[in-house]
Amino acid sequence: MTKKKYKAAVIGSGNWGSVAAKLVASNTLNLDSFHDEVRMWVFEETLPNGEKLTDIINITNENIKYLPGIKLGHNVVADPDLEHAVEDANMLVFVTPHQFIEGICKRLVGKIKGGVEAISLIKGMEVKTEGPCMISSLINKQLGVNCCVLMGANIGDEIAMEKFSEATIGYREDKEVAQRWVQIFGTPYFRVSAVRDIEGVELCGTLKNVVAIAAGFVDGLEMGNNAKAAIMRIGLNEMKAFSKLMFPSVCDNTFLESCGIADLITTCLGGRNRKVADAFARSGGKRSFHELETELLQGQKLQGVITAGEVYEVLCQRGWQESFPLFRTVHLICIGCAPPSAIIQQS
Amino acid sequence: MTKKKYKAAVIGSGNWGSVAAKLVASNTLNLDSFHDEVRMWVFEETLPNGEKLTDIINITNENIKYLPGIKLGHNVVADPDLEHAVEDANMLVFVTPHQFIEGICKRLVGKIKGGVEAISLIKGMEVKTEGPCMISSLINKQLGVNCCVLMGANIGDEIAMEKFSEATIGYREDKEVAQRWVQIFGTPYFRVSAVRDIEGVELCGTLKNVVAIAAGFVDGLEMGNNAKAAIMRIGLNEMKAFSKLMFPSVCDNTFLESCGIADLITTCLGGRNRKVADAFARSGGKRSFHELETELLQGQKLQGVITAGEVYEVLCQRGWQESFPLFRTVHLICIGCAPPSAIIQQS
């Protein structure tokens, strides 16, 4: 019998986190080198009936708040204690909202064992005074662990229902580790491939939200399908050019993986960023993004608007504004300095 | 005053042909080197009220059958006589249904003056015993004229309404001629760029219809957005690989032009090929493509089904079946040798 060397834990339990736990748990049961149990850290909530979310998940095997109706697998254990959830794990899956990751990493400093591998499913970046920092770098720097990323055209509910999807894992150097992540995420209905281009994969997942805002403006202004396809195309090209300027190692082919063109398509057709931008354009700019976010997303912040601001900061810092008319214009529209129709006049 | 050196004629007057005539006519009025008049060859039809289509177009300045409600420009002249329509022209725009082009070329042999340039807006290819032949090559060979192509995310009705669109011109060698085509097609709302990759551009326009059939199957089976994006992504990659095997000169960047990714998006979201394939999958394969074409397209043949068959022939001739699972599977489903669900099991 093979020794069980690896133990996975999932940090985060929203919709995508719960789906990730389900995928991983379905594989750990069948992989000899993995412990069956997958701990999932849950930010504890008390439900309207007074029960704790973790208790409900552990009793019903469902995350009734974020992924109702889906059994997670009996080997998924919800744990409200972050340090305890990761205690014995050496394969850490980070899948929290973008704005919480820095605080979570701070809590984990010194609590992580040697030989731990991490993967981030989080989309976004942090722009600091010294320049932009990707989430995988942040995890790597704060915790001293190697961190891969997994991105792609991944609407959580569809994967939970075991409908066919693809995803892309980006890794830096260690192909064997990337293959181990492919093993614990991949299923016949969730086809995962690994590419040696961590920055390219992660930037795809981040930047596509800016393009989705642009696509939402086109929808809201009823400019038609040709215009929407054109904006998506121009957006993909700016994603590629921006990524390559930021990291010369980024590969062209990454944009033809699931994390690139496929994720861009699903995000520009559905998704929150597109939806709120559509409503913004329809209001003729009379209602602010802030107001629409509050109304349509219960106060959650739109990732695309935040990223557009961060990208704009990079463009200004580096004098790249002229080369990225779409990215620039999305930000100017978001902050009310240009009308939504400017999305077509740009470039 | 500049001498008027160029005279344009449009061969074809369906929906896209009428839009092309409108675009060209709006530019010839303002370009000193062009004659104002644009002749448009119309395959004559007698309308239910007994009037001739050409008469109506010339009286109302509208193609009331194929582009109702849109003024073509007073300098567009409908002409039912093919030879007469092209008599003085030296810039020929070919925009007929794919299956008529060979017969039209035969009628024009010997009728074309020296120094004539052509452009094809026609999507499709002819597979002959000696191998596949693109429409631009067919025009070039039969008439001895240089022939560019114009492709892109171009839903005719939207361009007619002057909504923003992009298009790509593919040329072989003569950049100056390509720029002349850009001049007579481009407008502020119809943004045209030229790339030196005629085969790449033309194959994009042809092969995307096969991918649209695959996307229609995914829709009909209600497999979800992740799966549809995945199929479009896999399709784009097969388009690229197939084109590069056929013509090693084909450029990667062509697939990021309007003719590539953007046209693929509009075609997979709307369009006849997607629609009929959707109905086919919903019928559980009980109704044939032939029957659905008759019902949904008034007997018109679906371009994507024809192209899938032609591509399959090339794959078999050259032993490439294994490398193109999506293209192969689309054909096998179309001819009833595989169930629609095979579109996901492939590759």
Image (cartoon, coloured by chain):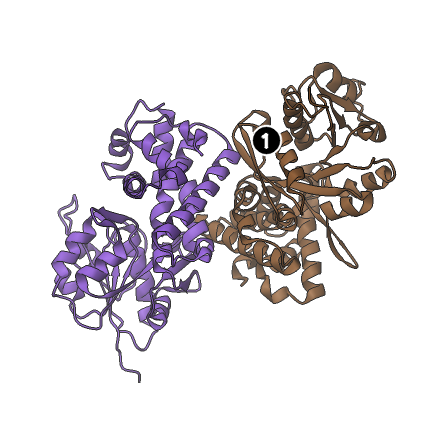
Chain colours: A brown, B purple
- Left or right of A176 on screen, residue A83: right
Q: Position of residue A190 (x, y in %)?
A: 56, 31
Tell whether A290 sits left or right of B152: right
Residue type, numbered disc 1: Gly
Q: Is residue A250 visible?
A: yes
Q: Is residue B165 left or right of residue A256?
A: left
Residue furthest to the top in view is A59
Relative to B92, A54 lies left or right: right
- Give percent across and percent down for residue A52: 80, 20
The extreme front residue here reads: A1
Q: Quadrant of residue A112?
A: top right
User: Residue placed farthest to the right in the image?
Assistant: A110
Front-most of residues B9 and B307: B307
Taking the spot 55% from the left edge, 62% from the top edge, the residue there is A346
Quadrant of the rendered structure where residue B237 is?
top left
**Up-down: is B163 above or below A152?**
below
Q: Nearer the viewer, residue B2 or B144?
A: B144
Residue A299 seen in the figure? no
Examine the rendered structure and indicate whether residue A273 appears above or below residue A245. Answer: above
Q: Position of residue A43 (x, y in %)?
A: 79, 30
Please give the name of the residue rendered at 24% of the width and 71% of the height, measured from the top-left corner: B7
Q: Residue at x 40, y 44 (%)?
A: B267
In this rendering, the answer to whether A302 lies above or below A160 is below
Q: Position of residue B63 (x, y in %)?
A: 25, 53
Decide: is A288 above or below B172: above
The C terminus of chain B sits in image quarter: top left
Q: Residues within 10 Å of mark 1 (few under 14, many from 20)?
A: some
Q: Quadrant of residue B184?
A: bottom left
Quarter of the rendering occupied by the N terminus of chain B: bottom left
Which chain is home to disc 1? A
Q: To which residue does mark 1 refer?
A: A186
Label 1: element kind: loop
